[in-house]
Structure formats: structure tokens, C-alpha cells
Image (cartoon, rainbow, N blue to C red):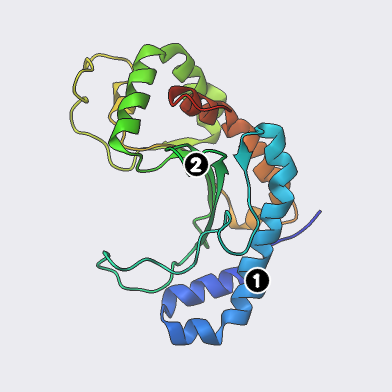
């Protein structure tokens, strides 16, 4: 078994949260490469076979630039918060057609005290929202299995984020999953204890989570006419 992250990983992330400036980052860049970015890229590489077992239409790209790993740098052009760096490290396991259309993704989030694994669509385009709402309305039985099965809901939480106050136009208020239709995001997440993230079974835990999330992602793909 491989241990990817360690106390120095979280030490760096806590440090960048307290000292979010370029001078501090460049003074600790070697620590970032050795304890955060490098191990995360190795984890992504090692997850490739497990993801392939979940779906042949999903990709995990371990390239240092342009792959699954998000940049630590923030885009501050339109943000009130001008901090140059994120306080976490994240990675997206994406659909093969993700560059062409809105597509659900798997997501890994590394942050002290707030690590999680999840999947779904975050801030989809309005047309994508409408398509998924209509698909859920037309296929409530399979939505119940994909998103509300007792085993699934015991393990994952449906992340509501922003929701509509009223039912979306064209849908009856008494529909049994009307609260789901109000969602702007269609995402399921599970918190990961720090001890798990720093421990030797992280890859195995994540592979089981990807398998458990597969029916949820499969449903979202079906709603958007995407292969899974």
C-alpha cells in the first residue's frame, strides 16, 4: 500500500491559507511540489486502472499541466478576493467529451479538515439544468435508485448549494422530488477524514467511492445523452 500525503502536506496547505502571497509561496514552492502536487499526481496516475473499471468513458490525466489537477493559482480577475492562491488542491476525473459539452465529473478535494470526494455537475449551464430537471421528472423511479437509495444516502450527501425558492417553471409543486428539481447543482459528496487521506489505504477508499458514485453519474450522463 502507498501513502501519498503526510503531515507536511497539510502543513503547506495551512501555511498558504495563513500566508496567501507570492513571496511566501515561492519560498515554500519546493515543499508544495514534494508534499502536495507530486503526491497528488502520483495518486491520479494510480487511480487510472480503478477508474477504467468504473467507466471506459472517463479519464484521469496525471500530467502536471493541463491534466486532471487544478492549478493552485486563483483566477482573481472578477473576484473580490484577490488572494493569488487556493487554500486547497483539487482534481477532476472527467468525461471524454467534457471539452465539447457539459458533463458530470468525479472530484477529489484536498484541504485540512475539509477533504472530500464527490461527483456530479457544479454550476451547469441553464440548458443543462433544464434537461436534467426534465429527465428527473420523466424518470423519477431511476432517480430514486441513483440518488436516494438508502445505501447511497448513508454514504453520500446531495450538495444543494444554491437552490430555487420556488419550483422551476413548468414543474408541479407536489412532485415527490421537487426539492431536487430546485437544485442549481447536481452533486453528491462524502467527507474524507484527515486520517484516511494521510493513511495507506487512500487509493483503495477512493476506488470504492468511485464505484459507489457510478450509478449517480451514470444517471446524469443518461439525462444528457452521454455514454457511461
- Please report the residue visible at 69 percent of the width from the left and 51 percent of the height from the top: 202
Say if 113 sits above or below 49 in the image.
below
Image coordinates of residue 188 in percent, x first then y, are 47, 37
- Please report the residue visible at 52 percent of the width from the left and 70 percent of the height from the top: 13
The quadrant the C terminus occupies is top right
- In the foreground, 132 or 66: 66
Tell me the CA gap for discs 1 and 2: 29 Å
- Secondary structure beneath disc 1? helix
Mark 1 lies on residue: 35
Image coordinates of residue 212 in percent, x first then y, are 61, 32
Say if 194 sits above or below 155 in the image.
below
Task: Give neighbour class at mark 2: few <14, some 14-19, many 20+ (Cα, 10 Å).
Answer: some
The tag on residue 115 is none
- In the foreground, 83 or 204: 83
**The image quarter in which residue 2 lies:** bottom right
Mark 2 lies on residue: 98
Amino acid at each position: 500500500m502507498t501513502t501519498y500525503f503526510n503531515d507536511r502536506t497539510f502543513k503547506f496547505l495551512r501555511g498558504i491559507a495563513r500566508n496567501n502571497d507570492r513571496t511566501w509561496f515561492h519560498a515554500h514552492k519546493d515543499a508544495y511540489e514534494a508534499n502536495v502536487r507530486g503526491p497528488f499526481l502520483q495518486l491520479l496516475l494510480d487511480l487510472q486502472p480503478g477508474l477504467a473499471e468504473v467507466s471506459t468513458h472517463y479519464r484521469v490525466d496525471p500530467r502536471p499541466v493541463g491534466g486532471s489537477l487544478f492549478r493552485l493559482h486563483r483566477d482573481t480577475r472578477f473576484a473580490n478576493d484577490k488572494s493569488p492562491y487556493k487554500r486547497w488542491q483539487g482534481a477532476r476525473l472527467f468525461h471524454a467529451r467534457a471539452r465539447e459539452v457539459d458533463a458530470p465529473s468525479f472530484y477529489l478535494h484536498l484541504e485540512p479538515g475539509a477533504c472530500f470526494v464527490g461527483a456530479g455537475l457544479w454550476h451547469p449551464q441553464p440548458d443543462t439544468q433544464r434537461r436534467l430537471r426534465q429527465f428527473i421528472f420523466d424518470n423519477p423511479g431511476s432517480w430514486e435508485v441513483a440518488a436516494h437509495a438508502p445505501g447511497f444516502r448513508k454514504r453520500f450527501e446531495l450538495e444543494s448549494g444554491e437552490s430555487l425558492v420556488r419550483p422551476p417553471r413548468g414543474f408541479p409543486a407536489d412532485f415527490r422530488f421537487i426539492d431536487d428539481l430546485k437544485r442549481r447543482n447536481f452533486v453528491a459528496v462524502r467527507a474524507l477524514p484527515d486520517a484516511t487521506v494521510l493513511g495507506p489505504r487512500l487509493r483503495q477508499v477512493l476506488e470504492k467511492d468511485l464505484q459507489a458514485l457510478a450509478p449517480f453519474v451514470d444517471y446524469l450522463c443518461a439525462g444528457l445523452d452521454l455514454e457511461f
